[in-house]
Amino acid sequence: MSEMSLHEAIHTQRAIRQFTGEPVPEEDIQALLDAAVCAPSGGNRQPWHFVVVRDPGLKAKLRELYHRSWNAYKEKVAEMARTRAEAAATLERWKKNPAGDHFAAELDKIPVFIIPCLDMRVLSFGDDPEAPSVMTTNSVYASIYPAVQNILLTARARGLGAVLTTLHCRYEDEAKRLLGIPAYLRTACLIPVGRPGARYGKTRRVPAAERTHKDGWNSALAATYEPGRGILRVADRMARNPVTCSPDTLVYDAQAVMREGHFGRLPVVEEGRLVGVVTDRDIRTALLPPEVPKGLKDRFDLLLVRRVKDIMTKNPVTIGPGDSIEQAADVLKARKPGGEGVVALLKALEEEGAEVLSVVSDPDPSDPANFVHYTVRVARADPKTLIPFLERKGIPRPEILLEEAGKG
Ligand SMILES: Cc1cc2nc3c(=O)[nH]c(=O)nc-3n(C[C@H](O)[C@H](O)[C@H](O)COP(=O)(O)O)c2cc1C
């Protein structure tokens, strides 16, 4: 037995469909089956038998069944591809990588097939395989697949290639007749075993955290997952190649670009690296000082002298394209504690007919992670009615800077 750790075997146990054709010693097959029978089964009934096929004639006939089933499967997927995007994507993938076709055509060249079979009599505590099982339906195949997994892991640990296949099951009765397997057994799968012709890579799977529900079903987590497609990732929803500006762009120009493109923010990029983000709000805040700085005609001239680097948020929090939407939402929630308060404030201002030109939130001095105090620049509002209106709504009183409509 090799020295490979269980951890490494589990994390590199991939489906191998290319083989060298080198023979597999009997001793290796025996080791796989010794591992198989260590598996758990319902009631420890051990309902398994393993048919080991090395005969080239039998393997060729099994390959013919598998190939027929593969073609039928492909036809079905092609039919579904007319109406379903997922099926169309699968078809496209097969066209680009015809490994499945080669595998189906060359299956019988793989040295050994192991066919784990399930004795239905054992599961029904009697001679009649059709008698209702004392176990739930789930427990029937669940009483053999742990043995199958032991075979796959042991193959991995011994440097052998293997893959769990089930396509022959479409013609299972023919397969059973061919091998003389009695009716009371079901073939759970067919595992070809040989020397791998491809490297065993690391398994690529959705991380467990994205499928883990603590203390019951987490529908928010489930909502980020599209069945059959996997988890929604940032790459699925992000805007690609966004318009950017540089730290030296004039604030005036950045504002013009944002207005033209109807963006609320621009990534600030220097030598291909993201160095900051400038938002519409940053620009409005830059205009806030009520005093016009010396030497400028009015404070809108500020836009012509200040540069993006003077007002941008430096080193913004980032998230990768491979991260999940849920992770992105968590980051946003953690970074925007004032979010709910500001939404209520904006809604109330809108209700009152005020035109909001800008909102700035200041951190609570006793708890800087919490934004509590808002300064709003508004037009078309009367502070005399607006303040009591906000108080009635239970919204903390903001600082109000009144502007003439249309000036901001
Ligand atoms: C129930 C079941 C049936 C499968 N049937 C087939 C099959 O008929 N043919 C095949 O090539 N692979 C089959 N596979 C293998 C899967 O395609 C493979 O485990 C999966 O794509 C993951 O591959 P990876 O371990 O290389 O990442 C089957 C796997 C399972 C669990």
Image (cartoon, grey):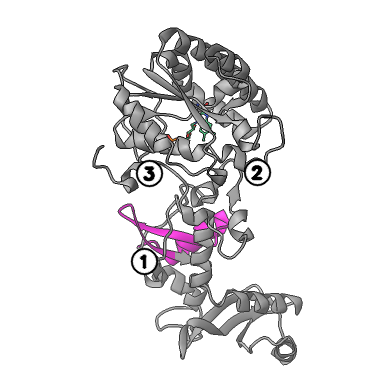
Marks 1 and 2 close (CB-CB < 8 Å) = no
SS for tag 2?
loop
Return the residue at label 3.
10
Percent x, y of residue 193: 38, 24
Of residues 384 and 29, the one nearer the viewer is 29
Does 36 lie within the magenta span? no
Q: Is residue 286 left or right of residue 31?
A: right
Question: Which amino acid type is marked by label 2?
Answer: Met
User: For the magenta stretch, what is the residue range?
Assistant: 248-277
Question: Is residue 404 in sight in this rendering?
Answer: no
SS for tag 1?
loop
Question: Is residue 268 in sight in this rendering?
Answer: yes
| Residue 135 circle label | 2
Few, some or many residues within 10 Å of mark 3 (<14, 14–19, 20+): some
Q: Earlier in the sequence, mark 1 or mark 2?
A: 2
Return the residue at label 1.
315
